[in-house]
Amino acid sequence: MENKPLTDTIEPTENQDAVVAALAEKWRDKKGSLIMALHDVQSHYGYIPRDVARKLAPQLNVPLARIYEVSTFYNYFRLTPPGKHVINVCMGTACYLKGAPELIEEIESLLGIKEGQTTSDGLFQLEVVRCLGCCGLAPVKTIDGEVHAKMTRKQVAEIIAKYK
Amino acid sequence: MSKQTIFLLRDSNSQKDNTRDFQILFSKIARDLNVEDKIQIIRAADLGIYDKGYIVKDLTNNIIYTNVSEEDISTILTSTINENKVVENLRYTPDKCQLRIVLKNCGLIDPESIEEYLGQEGYCGMAKAICDMTPEEVITEMKKSGLRGRGGAGFPTWLKWSFARNSLDEERYVICNADEGDPGAYMDRSILEGDPHAVIEGMIIAGYAIGAKRGFFYIRAEYPLAIKRIETALQQAYDNGLLGENILGTNFCFDLEIRLGAGAFVCGEETALIESVEGKRGTPRSKPPFPADKGLWNHPTIINNVETLATVPVIINRGGDWFGSIGTEKSKGTKVFAITGKVKNSGLVEVPMGITIGDVVFGIAGGVLGGRNLMAVQTGGPSGGVIPLDKMDTKVSYEHLAEVGSIMGSGGMIVMDEDDCMVDIPRFYLRFCVEESCGKCAPCRIGGYQMLKILDRIAEGKGEEKDLEQLKRIAYGMQKASLCALGQTAPNPVMSTMKYFSDEYRQHVIDKKCRAGKCTKMVQYIIDQAVCKKCKMCVINCAVGAISGSRESGYKVDQAKCIKCGACFEVCKFKAIIRK
């Protein structure tokens, strides 16, 4: 299994301490409530930040490894913040042949992230999808659901710049 | 006076939509009879009745008239509006009826109002159980009813309860399994969203019967509305003294809380679910000990499916004998199915056990979409199997479905037509199981992966005859050695398609052909020069430039370049592209 990186939050410490303390208070005395606590963390932050997990573990009286174990087992939990704009690049056969790998390479180098990751400013998230079902327009990528067809390396930079 | 709504419908099999003319005529007659202010006429798209000419539905009284001729209009209008009578000779009564026991309130009451539920004999079963009956009597009543678990395996509910009841451990739990994960099934969600109090009532009765003081709802996080409805319903039950301390003035105390799933299919398996409720990763435990003996935190626990629990109040209220009179000898009551796929009316149906699959598919669901031929019906999702066309007289019951190599499952029913490939479908299900395998035991983790690789190879046209044997061997190993039902049943879709559609597998392996054209690697697209009009649409639409030629010499597909995306096949207006 791949090692998923954990990400820290960028919020002030005091706020975070308060959030964690409130959560711990809510769930500490309820047996087996780790998953519920993690649901609360995720609905507050949009993912499970590493520093929150670190602080939460002793307060809930569970090992940090348990939090990592549970949050990587269940598909629902994210360990990286969701990006503001989600870029889906189609890796269907047609797109693949028409240069989707180069597109991904270009986006990765432009944004400095790998597939499945989010930029540090939280603006972009890059996902690779199986097929978007419009092979005639290959290669295709979508940003926030909007389809950009017949992409070239050059166009990628222009389009991404518009979202910045 | 409120307006009566009348729907108009055309015969769906006639090509022309002439309801507009019929509606004009209808309105004109209504005007002539001076009733136009009392009715509202709507042209509906589909009421689920076919080959019956014009259909008129009186929505207010829920009466359907079929084969309505122009002369009948005034009769219908006068008797409905003026005399408040039914025109018996035109009235439509379906020959294959649904029987709604579990879904009786869904869509009819406001799920966020406890008063409306109480108005439908709500909590009567619970009151009867905890005030007038002993826990043993409740279990006896359940035994009489013959209710079996609706989650798929069909274990007798009363037996599970009595195991927990007879345990020496005093701390016992009830869990409602609402982690519905089968692709294409949504019965439990509809019950939770449409009639949440029925499930809560069922849980209270179950708690009373086994002597538990606490219960948990395990609901998947992907069902936000269901969670919200259950939260509301729980609060209402507490506010009305139906949950908590000394329910209805008796000594019985019962608390319920919600635990959320987090997107793991394996957590539908009861021991994995227990692990998840305990806040751990959802990996199954080996059985025995069974949860009824050692479950949540090693205390006796019963886990029942949503549909099972929603059936309990009616059984207690109306008696086990009444419930036991419905269905077949060994499978009692009704079952809710989510019927989807290539069928005219997809949706939820609730049928008495013993009705045939054909009755459900052709009678209630209206048959296959677009007049195509039925290939098979799949039940039980990724754990189930297919039922081919010649077995459509199979009865809906645990035994009969098992006999033909499928299972009742939680209630997904997917209709497939001749365009579906019987190698591709099990591949889809198997991929699902491989992705959802928790990885704890080797037969499931490795076996599933290897089976999928073989199927992938077959679908790519690289299969060999010995692969079919190998598939069977791995499947056998998985069925016998996997820790939980996910691994044990994962090979079912493959095994049952191999049993009924062995020709199709052999065609894939030996002739390297896919009848349905779904296994794209084996498909070839060829341009029929005699039909081709040289419009060049295919050339323009080919993403990889595999089609070349000129108006004079004709166009050709370069098979080496072609990626079989099918774009040319779709755009050709003259059907000059042949797929084979």
Image (cartoon, coloured by chain):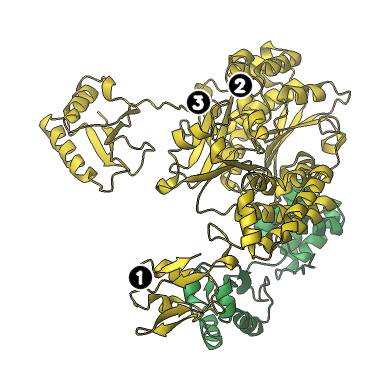
Chain colours: A green, B yellow
Q: Which residue is mark 2?
A: B328
Mark positioned earlier in the residue sequence (2 or 3): 3
Image mark 2: chain: B
The span from disc 3 to disc 1 (Cα, nearest Å) is 53 Å
Mark 1 surroundings within 10 Å by alpha-carbon count, few (fewer than 14), some (14 through 19), many (20 or more): few
Q: Quadrant of the N terminus of chain A?
A: bottom right
Residue most extreme to the top:
B132
| Mark number, residue B430 | none
Q: Which residue is mark 3?
A: B99
User: Is B440 left or right of B119, judged from the image as shown?
Assistant: right
What is the three-letter code of the residue carrying label 3? Leu
What is the three-letter code of the residue carrying label 1? Val
Answer yes or no: is residue B423 visible. Answer: no
Q: Quadrant of the C terminus of chain A?
A: bottom right
Q: Are marks 3 and 1 on the same chain?
A: yes
What is the three-letter code of the residue carrying label 2? Thr
Q: Are marks 2 and 3 on the same chain?
A: yes
Q: Position of residue B441 (x, y in %)?
A: 84, 50
Mark positioned earlier in the residue sequence (3 or 1): 3
Image mark 1: chain: B
The span from disc 2 to disc 3 (Cα, nearest Å) is 14 Å
Q: Which residue is mark 1?
A: B531
Q: Nearer the viewer, mark 2 or mark 1?
A: 1
